[in-house]
Image (tube, grey):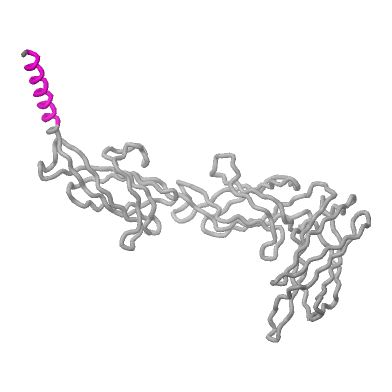
Amino acid sequence: MKKSIFITVTITTATAILLFLSGCGRFYSAEIAGYIKDSNSGNGINGAIIRMYLEEPEAANSDNFIVETASMVSGGNNGYFNHKIMWETWNAKFGDEGDSGTIWLGVTHDDYSPAIIKVSGIISNSVNLVPDIKLDRATFSSPTVTGRVVNVNGEGVNGVRIVLDLASTTDEDQDYITTTATINGNTGTYEFRNVTWRDDIPDSEDSDTEDITLIIDDPDYTTSGSLSAIITSDQDNNIQDDITVSRKPRTDFSVTVNGMCYFTDTNGDMQPLPGITIEIDYSDDNDDSHTLYDTTDSNGNYSLLIQWTDSTPTNDPEGEDVLSVTVKYTDDSGEYTFTPASIGYTIRSWINPYTLPNKEGS
């Protein structure tokens, strides 16, 4: 009998404690809405992460947030966010009618500096539209960074591997890599696209500059050192100083030779000539003769890989050579002729691919 009374008393006491604790506070909710915008342009920013805190966070992305959301397009407007929050309090400002308080918003975006915003006067059971939150741009880019790699004679050199390193990156990884080629008719041109860097304290609201280092990183070429330069965001940057390289000594050479055959129609327009036989003849270091063939494609284009060995190359410039070849153009159908049918060219090893002049048939 005593045991039964003890159990009854224990259950009753626990229930009383539970009821007491459940009455310690009330829960309130509110909607928080607003816009994230670029501080310079005023345009809405989509994809920003908004974290909401009941206490001021140490950082905009601290882990102790209560909810998080992202800015997006709403009603045709960029940068909008809206999220409901809940909190508990013992002493509501308006009693059972509601509560008012302060929250903090931590806003982050990959392209902008983070921000922590204090928002006072949040009213429960309401949509609270906060003032526009403006972020400062921190990511900048240049559409293109271009320049030239040349030999000691000032001639452009194609096929050279070049690295662009940004001063703002602390890792040892190579930031951007490309290979020189013929661009807009200029041999030895390098072109880096969309070079991007981050700067949380930019030079101005709408632009920034970045120190870069250009490094030749090619097993076949040497240079006296790297080239330093400064680039500016939101514009094409052409590096005025050329990078001079020397080819390491070698005896084996190869160059891709390409070109085009065409005819002129009655309107004076250039039209491709497909099916033309291209013959290239040359002799190597041992006076052995070599003959290569190709046929122009539907666009009138042809391409041949020429390889040769020269134990005593010209080395002008260093590590390079030249090769005399004869190119013959033949239309096996007999419809078109070429004048002259054979032409001699001097192939330069440092220009690869080597593009021959277009050849007209009549």
Instruction: Give x and y (percent) for residue 200.
Output: 45, 46
Residue shown at the point (29%, 53%) measured from the top left: 34
Taking the image as shown, residue 350 lies to the left or right of residue 125, namely right
Give x and y (percent) for residue 310: 88, 52
Q: Is residue 37 left or right of residue 315?
A: left
Q: Which residues are magenta?
A: 2-21
| Principal secondary structure, stretch drawn in magenta | helix
Work out which quarter of the rendered image holds the C terminus and state it: bottom right
- Identified at 82% across, 47% down, the residue is 249
Q: Nearer the viewer, residue 310 or 172?
A: 310
Q: Nearer the viewer, residue 220 or 169?
A: 220
Q: Position of residue 220 (x, y in %)?
A: 76, 47
Q: Quadrant of the N terminus?
A: top left
Answer above or below: position of 65 versus 45. Answer: above
At 13% from the left and 37% from the top, the residue drawn is 91
Q: Which residue is farthest bottom?
A: 266
For residue 14: magenta?
yes
In front here: 82 or 291? Answer: 291
The answer to which image quadrant residue 168 occupies is top right
Residue furthest right as drawn: 287
